Image (cartoon, coloured by chain):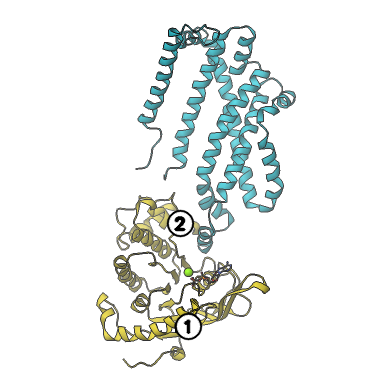
Chain colours: A yellow, B cyan
Amino acid sequence: MDSSMATPSIAADHRPAHLQLINVWKRFGPPERQTVAVRNVDLAIQPGEFVTLIGPSGCGKSTLFNMIAGLIAPDDDGSILLSNKVQQDYGLLGKVAFMPQRDLLFPWRTVIDNATLPLEIEGVSRKAARARAEALFPEFGLEGFETHYPHQLSGGMRQRVALMRTFLFERDLVLLDEPFGALDALTRSMMQRWLLDVWAKHRRTVLFITHDIDEAIFLGDKVVVMTARPGTIKCAERINLPRPRAASVTTTGEFIDIKRRLLAVVEEESLKTFGGATLA
Amino acid sequence: MVAGGVTWRDRLAVVIGLATLFIVWQAATMLFAVPDYILPRPLDIAWAIVERREQIWRALLFTLAETGAGFAIGALIGIGLAVCLVLIPPCEAVVMPLAVAINAVPSVAFVPLALIWFGLGMGSKIAMAVLAIAFIVLLNALSGLKKPEQGHIDLMRSFGAGRFGILWRLRLPAAMPSIVTGLRVGLGRSTIAVIVAEMLGAYDGIGQIVYQSTAQVDYLSVWAAVLTAMLGSLALYGCLVAIDRKLIWWR
Ligand SMILES: Nc1ncnc2c1ncn2[C@@H]1O[C@H](COP(=O)(O)OP(=O)(O)O)[C@@H](O)[C@H]1O
Ligand SMILES: [Mg+2]
């Protein structure tokens, strides 16, 4: 693979975008002591695409997700379009399947009742909701744990319950905020392959935050790199590694080439976060 | 794993505790020949209860009915008010200082007023029980309802849940442990309030037996009433523990 730094060349894709961000900004605090969390973000994601978003910690990734989920309103500078329709403030609530950074399971609900929470909110009957969830248990590796409580599960299983809850909220756009961030390396790599299987079967559009470059490349059709705070899109790179991807793909020359290029960009931004210009 | 009510071990512990108390008490009063008017022997008290069983049983039911009614009404008021305050936050600034102020005064201080307003019958005792429990439940329920952090609330919002959905599926379950704590403390307080109110003026009830027997220098009857009240409270508390485990099943 030649080392053409793919930046806006991605604009080659002319299908209508599933999600489009145009000049999105988010500032916090009063004008005199303002934190700019997200600045001038332009991003387009095609239907069924798996996009990974990577950037130094504190660069505004979660803030961006909160805006796409409709939880906070973006500043008036720009707009968010879902299926080509401009979204009002908070208009995206209930339209996007959003999995926050922590699993946020409810301790008083069993595994299955945690998973069916979004269906209950939508007004699906308890019985129908459970039937739909039960069908997913084998696929999510949770068979036999339906009536367990969250505190009885390992971190990996809790995360899978949270993912199942997100998937049962059947929306075409799925936002996953560092879903595997707290897992050990072994569990994480198993979960990554498993997630790709699930995604291949359900074909939702996925936007996935991570701070792990390997994870970003392994999972994504496209890796989007954010700058240090105030975060904006630094560059994007299409990943043409063939699918389905096995764990061994991470040791191929192609993978390492991509990684080397992305690493250079990400390191540059991470150093800025540390204020470490002297190190560079 | 789910705890299903009061276990046999809990019951055994209570029985052993009570038995030990009575045996030591009986032995000590016999050994040191303590005069009856200072501390009667448990067997004599037990006999006194048996002798006066009809009167004491009627009084106990009377007192329990007052406490139970006041407890239920007060708990509903406390929880209901807390829910309203969470749904309409501006009200909190008005109601809370008032609630805290009323809660700071020992509720028995209101007994004379209750007797004037509601008479010597059950009404005044129920009012006292309501007063004793409503505010503590309100305070606990409110802090419990506000416990869920923004992350959980945002999760519910992202699924399209509104104010009531968040209340029903997130705030109320999260508040259960606090509410139960409030109920537990409130139960003790309302029992005290009812018995004190009965002592100051009533037609029947354990407190009234204590009052009349004291006036007649019938210490055995006083003790019989006190012991009965103690056992009655224990039974009430047992019910509450069982309810507690039903309401907080996930621990
Ligand atoms: N509600 C808020 N009020 C003020 N500042 C915030 C708020 N939310 C996030 N920020 C700030 O915005 C920046 C980006 O945060 P975040 O989006 O959580 O970063 P990331 O997820 O990339 O680690 C941080 O500096 C954070 O302190
Ligand atoms: Mg984050």
Tell me the tag on residue A278.
Answer: 1
Depth check, mark 1 against mark 2: the one in front is 1
Which chain's residue wears label 1? A
Check the image and report above or below for B53 versus B90: above
Residue A182: percent from left, percent from top:
38, 64
Residue B84: percent from left, percent from top:
64, 48
Task: Indicate the amino acid at tag 1.
Answer: Thr
- For the residues beneath circles 1 and 2, the answer to whether they share a chain is yes
State the SS at label 1.
loop
- Write down the residue under mark 2: A117
Q: Nearer the viewer, residue B42 or A13?
A: B42
Residue at horizontal 60%, vertical 26%? B192
Q: CA distance from mark 1 to mark 2?
A: 50 Å
Residue at far front of view: A278
Q: Where the N terminus of chain B falls, by quadrant?
A: top left
Q: Nearer the viewer, residue A276 or A242?
A: A276
Residue A27: percent from left, percent from top:
61, 74
**Viewed as shown, does residue A38 lie left or right of A241?**
right
Count residues near mark 2 (Cα–Cα under 10 Å), then give few for <14, some for 14-19, many for 20+: many
Task: Indicate the amino acid at tag 2.
Answer: Leu
